[in-house]
Image (tube, rainbow, N blue to C red):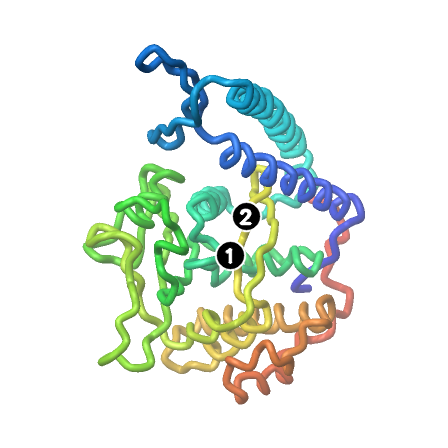
Amino acid sequence: MLFSDLRNEQIRQTIDAEQVFSGYRSARGELDTRFAGSMSWKSIAGGTYLYRKVHGASRSLGPKSPETEQIYESFQSGRTRQRDLVRGLATRLDEMAPVNRALGIGRVPLVSARVLRQLDGSGLLGRAIHVVGTNALYAYERMAGIRIDSGLVATGDVDLLLDARRTLKIAAPGLSSEGLLGLLRKADTSFSLMGRRSFRAVNRDGFMVDLIKPSPRDRLTDADRASLGGDDDLHAVEIEGLAWLVNSPKQRVVVIDDRGYPLIMAVPDPRAFALHKAWLAGREDRELGKRQRDAAQAKLVAGMVAERLPHLRFDADDLSALPVALRRAAANLRSEPDDGEDGRLEPGW
């Protein structure tokens, strides 16, 4: 059996964790924007002025007056309340984490989760970068309310799809000159490039992060960005067929890592994933073992969409960017019927 239903307690705990996480993200976002920096009084030339300092830059809000005193009091009291709220929600997530682990709903590998949190915090995730490959299955299983067989999601790497069309100033205005590698090192300091201008970074445990992008339509005229930083950053490798994933609808899904903490994962539409995997499985120049895994994942996701996400139709207009022949191949993507004999008859003594 390629996937199984979640138990009622797993569903309930997942929903509760998502709600608390949503509250935390909202509260933390307000704390980091509305109450960013500090506010203080300064004596200048015999007068007292209210100053607001954010990211090292200070500006005057005016001389001391009933109005500026009210601004100051509102900022200080509001920030205190907001910090208390964020602190309480963070504690609640800490309390829920061991329960999430015990119920088996923590699925995303820890390194992947830490990398994605850095990408999310930078503003890149869901804009210039999406998760593709095996790790995307964690988002699809959450969308369908199922648990995918561990053999189909086991992986020691994460593939990041770069949408090189996006302007970096819009996608991630605060990205440092270290680019993607700098973000990876915030997640794990041991990440390093596998060669100069490589598309791959690896950490001390052998976990790899690959940066990939579609092949351009015209190599003579197209000059899409391949890196988010300089020469010492990852440089995306061009791979045929990825344009279908770049141009497909996207999903942002709350998933839970294997320590029990929620995070955001941004992925291409599961229909596009299934069709792309089926296309890969049919390529004779691809390694046989990978083709077999591609075929299994294609059937899994297509069957999951048909059974659990019937509102996502393969003939819908939102997939019009995909080739017609590729979309028609969906009719052949059906998992064999489950005879119900796959489950273990004994606990894992």
Q: Residue furthest bottom?
A: 325
Q: Is residue 329 left or right of residue 338?
A: left
Mark seen at residue 28: none
- Tell which circle, 1 or 2, labels the residue nearer the N-terminal end: 2
- Asked whether 158 or 61 is in front, the reply is 61
Residue at 39% from the left image edge and 76% from the top image edge: 286
Q: Position of residue 168 (x, y in %)?
A: 35, 56
Q: Position of residue 325 (x, y in %)?
A: 53, 89
Mark 1 is surrounded, within 10 Å at the Cα level, by few (under 14), some (14 to 19) or many (20 or more) other residues, namely many
Question: Of the residues shown, which amino acid type is indicated by label 2?
Answer: Val
Q: Quadrant of residue 176?
A: top left
Marks 1 and 2, Cα distance to the nearest angstrom?
8 Å
Residue denoted by label 1 = 135
Q: Is residue 219 left or right of residue 328?
A: left
Whether pointer 1 and pointer 2 mark residues with C-beta atoms closer than 8 Å, the reply is: yes
Q: Is residue 349 visible?
A: no
Residue at 59% from the left image edge and 25% from the top image edge: 78
Residue at 37% from the left image edge and 32% from the top image edge: 55
Relative height, residue 104 to residue 322 (above, below): above
- Asked whether 136 or 203 is in front, the reply is 136
- Asked whether 310 or 70 is in front, the reply is 70
Relative height, residue 249 to residue 207 (above, below): below
Q: Quadrant of residue 205?
A: top left
Where disc 2 sits, the SS reads: loop
Question: Of the residues shown, which amino acid type is indicated by label 1?
Answer: Asn
Residue denoted by label 2 = 108
Where disc 1 sits, the SS reads: loop
